[in-house]
Image (cartoon, rainbow, N blue to C red):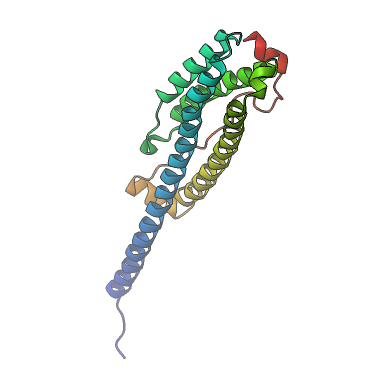
């Protein structure tokens, strides 16, 4: 039986490292694309909400006594939110914070709109407006679900690129950890309904 020399052992070890590196790279690319896909779903859900807003505002505007200031705030917040896009390749904490801030302004405006809506019986009786509000509620639930799925994808991906030996491959191959979608500052405090009218 032929003995394997030191060079042969080194070749086997190098071959195992190369094969593992290929496996690690391919699976990490798959996870990275999972993060990108999850982010696209978050954006899609927010877009769905942004698409609903003009219909909600147009229906509310039919009622002359409805507060124009509230509607203007919602329209402006939507405009600001749609102008901020985060590319999946740039999922940094700063970019996600800017995106989240713009989206929270939309949420705040919609919160004021819904709180004001309670004071208008004719608007409350409008079936079209009721269905739009129900659709908005379903969309908000979808947004929350997609943000959670995004964070789950980020968590799995980040573990892979931060643990040994992945951290070495990540450094060599240029895989950076992705940022989590953070809750808005102060989200842990229940909202003050009266404050909605003060803003």
- Number of labels in the image equals 0
Image vertical order of residue 100 relative to residue 160, above or below = above
- Image quadrant in which the C terminus is located: top right
Image vertical order of residue 183 relative to residue 40, above or below = above
Residue 132 location in percent, x, y? Answer: 57, 30
Q: Quadrant of residue 118?
A: top right
Image vertical order of residue 145 relative to residue 190, above or below = below
Q: Residue at x 51, y 43 (%)?
A: 150
Q: Residue at x 55, y 37 (%)?
A: 143
Image vertical order of residue 199 relative to residue 25, above or below = above
Q: Nearer the viewer, residue 51 or 150?
A: 51
Q: Residue at x 39, y 38 (%)?
A: 88
Q: Nearer the viewer, residue 110 or 182?
A: 110
Q: Nearer the viewer, residue 72 or 149?
A: 72
- Image quadrant in which the N terminus is located: bottom left
Q: Is residue 35 left or right of residue 18?
A: right
Residue 168 location in percent, x, y? Answer: 40, 51
Q: Residue at x 58, y 28 (%)?
A: 128
Residue 43 location in percent, x, y? Answer: 45, 35
Q: Nearer the viewer, residue 79 or 190?
A: 79
Q: Is residue 154 left or right of residue 11?
A: right
Residue 74 location in percent, x, y? Answer: 53, 17
């Amino acid at each position: 039986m032929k003995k394997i020399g030191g060079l042969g052992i080194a070749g086997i070890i190098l071959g195992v490292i190369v094969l593992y590196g290929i496996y690690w790279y391919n699976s990490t690319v798959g996870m990275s694309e999972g993060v990108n896909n999850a982010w696209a779903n978050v954006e899609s859900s927010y877009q769905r909400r942004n698409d609903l807003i003009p219909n909600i505002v147009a229906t509310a505007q039919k009622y002359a006594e409805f507060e124009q200031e509230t509607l203007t705030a919602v329209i402006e917040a939507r405009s600001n939110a749609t102008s901020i896009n985060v590319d999946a390749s740039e999922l940094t904490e700063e970019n996600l914070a800017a995106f989240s801030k713009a989206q929270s302004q939309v949420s705040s405006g919609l919160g004021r709109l819904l709180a004001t809506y309670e004071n208008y019986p004719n608007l409350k009786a409008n079936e079209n407006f009721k269905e739009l509000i129900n659709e908005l509620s379903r969309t908000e639930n979808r947004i929350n679900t997609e943000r959670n799925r995004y964070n789950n994808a980020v968590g799995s991906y980040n573990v892979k690129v931060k643990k040994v030996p992945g951290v070495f491959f990540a450094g060599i191959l240029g895989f950076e950890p992705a940022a989590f979608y953070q809750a808005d500052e102060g989200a842990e405090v229940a909202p003050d309904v009266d404050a909605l009218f003060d803003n």
